[in-house]
Image (cartoon, grey):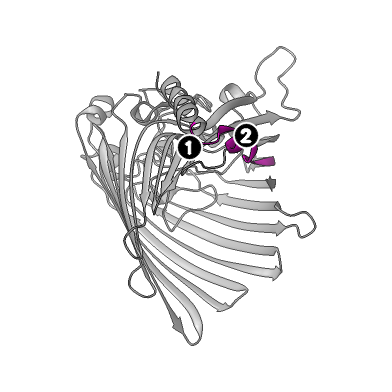
Amino acid sequence: MKKLAVATLIAGVATQSFAATDLESAFKEAKLLGQIRAFYIDRNYESGGNDRSAFAIGGKAGFETAPVYGLKAGVMFYTTNGIDAHRTDNGVLNKHLDSSLFGKDKKSTTYVGQLYLQYDINKTTLKIGRQEINTPLAGMDDARMLPNLFEGALITNKSLDKTTLILGHFWNMAYGTFANAYSACSYLGLQSGYGCGGYTSLNVGLAKYDTGNFMNMGKQAIGKSNAGVTVLAAIYEGIPNLKLQFWDYYAWDMLNAVYLQGDYTFNVANMKTTVSAQYINETNVGNNIKKVFGKEVGANLFGAKINVNPVSSLNVYAAWSTTGKDEGKLLNGGLVTPWGGTPGFVQGTVTRLGYVADTTAWKVGASYDIIKGLNLHVAYSYFNVGNKAVYASRTHDASETDWDITYKCRLIKNLEWKARGIYTWNFVPGQNFTEYRLIANYNF
């Protein structure tokens, strides 16, 4: 019903408002928008694992009308299509096909991912319908072929000097293809950006998420519908060199999550330096989580980071984070991150253990512009996981080493190539693997 309501609203407002001025011009001056993406991934386990790989082509394409009296509408289609994504001779799913590039059951899929109205007046923007959002604890997590998407209303206001105010409410979301890398409703998935996908029991198996299907925010998170998630934020930059962020996510009958971040930039020996701090706090709201899992939410994360630019082409950084522990709370006090938001300063390309309970983590990295348009990034992340991290049930150390090469083609505008190497150790106790990715993005 909500899908039909949004579509009807777009059609109705377009007919009444645009027709009263110049509907024809609004569509004649519409912009074609999108991205073509090709993605190859190959993962190999050191021993006893299910090696997998995949190649897919897809992306997104749509249009946005020209504004008429500040009002415009947009639609965007998303698709992923396997190349040589075959099944076995008897029709059984190829177990070596990496599910994170595809839709449900490792199939190609196409759907309407964005369908919205946007109204701009003075310094205020209202956007309602299906849309992309990127916020600390709810976001696209565009790590594979297709991102997470959200359905709701978002108001952004910049009337106050150096201040951005945000108010939103989202009732539905659709998981992208990366969700399929996790077991639906697993301990690790719940702490790595993904929830239950409609299921109510833990560890129900791989590839159970229905990619592109817009479902209630609560149902996606814990398998139980709720009134959605209300977001309130303030971003202040009125003090020179200082940026402060406050975000509050009220997930009705689930939890309340607060995210704080501060970034201060100054010069040390003529080197641009930024020091940052972050804090996440989650508290329980209502009875839904306890009904599903038997425990209430209660979690904290502290993080710090320093970033230094010795020269304009080089950036080096170091980060640290720690989480609490409480055996009386869900996940023994680990964070619940079911809507794609994983903003921790310490996070590997694959490894997201910094959100589990009783874990201290640190990360070092460097980014260097070799020549204009060609960048090399290297990083090392280390996680000391305590015995209260329920996904592993025992103390262990884990690490990830990464390199990324990004090339923005100067001959073909808006074309970007990426190559990535990922080397994990003890991702879960005793599990080591290497992973390579090749990605091409063309934006238009």
Q: Position of residue 84 (x, y in %)?
A: 76, 28
Q: Residue furthest right?
A: 411
Q: Residue at x 51, y 54 (%)?
A: 399
Q: Is the residue 350 above or below the residue 88 in the image? A: below
Dot 2 alpha-carbon crowd within 10 angstroms: few under 14, some 14 to 19, many 20 or more: many
Nearer to us in this view, 66 or 80:
66
Of labels 1 and 2, the one closer to you = 1
Q: Which residue is mark 2?
A: 101
Task: For residue 439, say whether it is visible.
Answer: no
Q: Distance between the Cα atoms at labels 1 and 2?
A: 21 Å
Residue named by callout 1? 131
Q: Is residue 236 left or right of residue 424?
A: left
Residue 62, numbered label:
none
Residue type, mark 1 in image: Gln
Count numbered badges in the picture.
2
Q: Is residue 29 magenta?
A: yes
Mark 1 / mark 2, whichever is N-terminal: 2
Question: What's the amino acid at mark 2?
Answer: Leu
Q: Secondary structure at mark 2?
A: helix
What residue is shown at x 32% (from left), y 36% (from top)? 229
Q: Which residues are magenta?
A: 20-40
Q: What residue is shown at x 78% (from left), y 54% (from top)?
A: 412
The answer, for residue 305, to whether it is visible in the render is yes
- Residue 264 pos. (x, y %): 38, 72
* Between 387 and 223, the one nearer to me in the picture: 223
